[in-house]
Image (cartoon, rainbow, N blue to C red):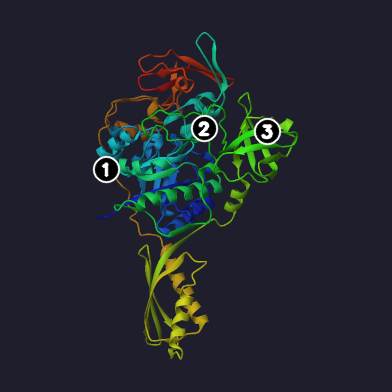
């Protein structure tokens, strides 16, 4: 029986990040297209994407490109042209939100349904599968039980986030940023109002909570749940972070590569998607890259603490508590297992008012930390909990070559007329043959000749290969070292040429299935912003389609966000599902919203107007 192939999917802000993600163990990367990606600040040129595809093909790693914004009518032709160009560049899949793509004449590039398509139910995922999507990226909020139910009801591969920043709203169902200033999350320009400080008030004006980041969440960390996620039906584990730095991509990819490999080693029926032996030159630690503290985000079915109301910024790893304060230094009682604070580390803490403060460790002597300014100016106090959000030594490690990925290659050599015949095959299944002209001079020292040949052929450092097996079907010959080295270089070049060759793909447009949509009326929440998307639904039996919020903002009170997070629960004000809470008001200098509590399902609906 063929093994189930499991994918680790890493983000790529740019070509360099994408290459490092693959080098550190990613089976696939996702990267922003030049236009129409949900992170407008993370677009990339076609040339860079093509280069990333070539690097990925070497290891059997795929490249997925995000084109997951809503499209307006005037953008449809440009979007189609870009999709075709990406297919020609070697891209394996497009991640999309807009159903207009399924009404376009496109080559047979795989379409993945973005989490922006609000994939929460078996019915929704089944519809997307039957409509021609080759993968569905699930909503982040789903429990293992719900994932299992969706998996049981469908056959389409399921992708789920395993790590990274969290949007408080169900993806694709947030219009708060658009309502505040026209910066639409569905158009790739979200202003992140959920990370701002808000006042929470009763309808009478009484303040319940002032100046806190009530919609800001911790970061997802599901590293302890990889096995259960596999059992529930997840085949692609996705790391968030297309705006993150290269050190983040290296560290987090390495961490999850190791965690996923440990789990796969325990399973006879599963294997990773791509190839190559990955060696990390550091010990990965997710707390050392941008990290707001971790949550499994309802995966286990438990509510837990998901909010980060004190600050939307990354505090990093907890280091310990200040036990003494002097004029020019503080004494830290370190938490067990932490690597020591060193000169140049960045530290932070919450002051007594709950404000985040930062310091730089200018000099460290054991547990004594001397900041770069007088202690009195830093706000440090006895009892303060220190976190390290800039690990100087760790980041120095990541500035260097921090991983290598090499493919196993087997060589077979036999003597033929006027030279040698070489067959080479790497672990991906690629193979080449090569005739090498050399004068067959019998060796005087047979053992030395054979040893020299083996040693020189194994010198594959600086290439993506290592020698796994060598079969010599020839008598001991004297071959100059320079000639053996030339033979090795020529065979490596042939393998690299074979790896770089573009696959032969059918370019004929694909016809997508047309199946009935389970509803006949759609509101603005369906995110239909162009004529092709409207045609997609009307051809499937929908009789009434409202335009998207971004096309025509609905009149009167309108829902701008729906969440599983509950502010009342986070503040300890919840009285249980049986007690329907009265609406409260969120307000700051940017705007004012009414919060309706969905007490039967433990969530919120936030409304403007």
Viewer-proximal residue among 337 and 396? 337
Q: Please say whether residue 229 is visible from this viewpoint.
A: yes
Q: Which of labels 1 and 3 is toward the front?
A: 3
- The residue wearing badge 1 is 155
- The residue wearing badge 3 is 324
| Residue sitting at x 39%, y 56% | 274
Q: Report helix, strand or loop for mark 3.
A: strand
**Residue 190: assigned label:** 2
User: Where residue 196 appears, x then y in whole percent?
Assistant: 56, 27
Q: Report helix, strand or loop for mark 1.
A: loop
Viewer-proximal residue among 537 and 62? 62
Q: Which of labels 1 and 2 is toward the front?
A: 1
User: Where residue 516 appears, x then y in whole percent?
Assistant: 25, 33
Q: Residues within 10 Å of mark 2 (few under 14, many from 20)?
A: many
Q: In terms of sequence position, does the residue under pointer 1 or pointer 3 come before the other?
A: 1
User: Where residue 420 appears, x then y in whole percent?
Assistant: 40, 82
Q: In terms of sequence position, does the residue under pointer 3 or pointer 2 come before the other?
A: 2
Q: Which of labels 3 and 2 is toward the front?
A: 3
Please state if 292 lies on the left or on the right of 499 as rendered.
Answer: right
Q: Is residue 364 above or below residue 458?
A: above
| Residue sitting at x 37%, y 64% | 427
């Amino acid at each position: 029986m063929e093994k189930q192939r499991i994918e680790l999917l890493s983000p790529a802000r740019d070509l360099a990040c994408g290459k490092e993600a693959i080098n550190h163990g990613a089976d696939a990367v996702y990267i922003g297209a030049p236009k129409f990606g949900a992170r407008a600040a993370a677009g990339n040129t076609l040339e860079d994407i093509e280069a990333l595809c070539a690097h990925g093909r070497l290891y059997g790693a795929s490249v997925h490109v995000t084109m997951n914004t809503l499209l307006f009518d005037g953008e449809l032709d440009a979007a189609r042209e870009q999709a075709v160009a990406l297919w020609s560049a070697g891209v394996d899949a497009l991640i999309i939100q807009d159903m207009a793509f399924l009404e376009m004449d496109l080559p047979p590039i795989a379409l993945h349904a973005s989490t922006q398509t609000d994939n929460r139910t078996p019915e929704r995922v089944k519809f997307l599968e039957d409509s021609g999507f080759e993968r569905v990226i699930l909503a982040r909020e789903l429990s293992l039980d719900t994932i299992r139910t969706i998996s049981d009801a469908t056959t389409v591969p399921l992708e789920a986030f395993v790590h990274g920043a969290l949007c408080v709203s169900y993806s694709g169902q947030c219009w708060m940023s658009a309502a505040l200033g026209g910066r639409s999350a569905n158009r790739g320009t979200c202003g992140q109002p959920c990370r701002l400080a808000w006042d929470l008030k009763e309808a009478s004006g009484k303040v319940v909570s002032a100046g806190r980041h009530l919609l800001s969440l911790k970061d997802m960390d599901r590293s302890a749940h990889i096995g259960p996620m596999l059992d529930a039906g997840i085949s692609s584990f996705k790391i968030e972070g297309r705006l993150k730095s290269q050190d983040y991509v290296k560290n987090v990819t390495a961490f999850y590569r190791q965690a996923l490999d440990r789990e796969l080693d325990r399973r006879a029926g599963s294997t990773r998607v791509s190839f190559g032996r990955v060696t990390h030159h550091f010990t990965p630690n997710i707390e050392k890259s941008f990290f707001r503290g971790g949550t499994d985000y309802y995966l286990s079915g438990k509510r837990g603490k998901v909010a980060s109301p004190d600050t939307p910024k990354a505090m990093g790893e907890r280091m310990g508590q200040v036990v003494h304060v002097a004029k020019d230094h503080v004494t830290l009682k370190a938490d067990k297992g932490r690597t020591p604070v060193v000169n140049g580390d960045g530290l932070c803490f919450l002051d007594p008012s709950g404000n985040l403060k930062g310091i730089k460790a200018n000099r460290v002597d054991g547990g004594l930390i001397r900041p770069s300014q007088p202690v009195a100016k830093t706000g440090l106090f006895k009892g303060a909990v220190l976190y390290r959000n800039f690990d100087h030594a760790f980041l120095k490690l990541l500035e260097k070559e921090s991983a290598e990925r090499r493919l196993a290659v087997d060589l077979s050599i036999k003597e033929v007329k006027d030279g040698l015949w070489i067959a080479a095959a790497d672990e991906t299944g690629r193979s080449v043959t090569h005739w090498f002209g050399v004068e067959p001079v019998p060796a005087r020292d047979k053992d030395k000749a054979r040893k020299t040949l083996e040693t020189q052929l194994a010198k594959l450092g600086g290439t993506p290969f290592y020698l796994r097996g060598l079969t010599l079907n020839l008598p001991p010959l004297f071959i100059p070292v320079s000639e053996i080295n030339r033979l090795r270089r020529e065979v490596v070049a042939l393998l690299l040429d074979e790896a770089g060759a573009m696959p032969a793909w059918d370019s004929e447009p694909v016809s997508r299935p047309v199946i009935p949509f389970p509803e006949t009326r759609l509101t603005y929440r369906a995110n239909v912003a162009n004529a092709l998307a409207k045609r997609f639904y009307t051809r499937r039996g929908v009789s009434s389609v409202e335009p998207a919020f971004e096309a025509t903002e609905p009149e009167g009170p309108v829902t701008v966000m729906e969440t599983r997070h509950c502010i009342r629960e986070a503040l300890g004000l919840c009285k249980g599902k049986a007690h329907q809470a009265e609406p409260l008001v969120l307000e700051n200098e940017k705007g004012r919203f009414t919060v309706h509590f969905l007490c039967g399902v433990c969530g919120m609906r936030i409304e403007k107007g």
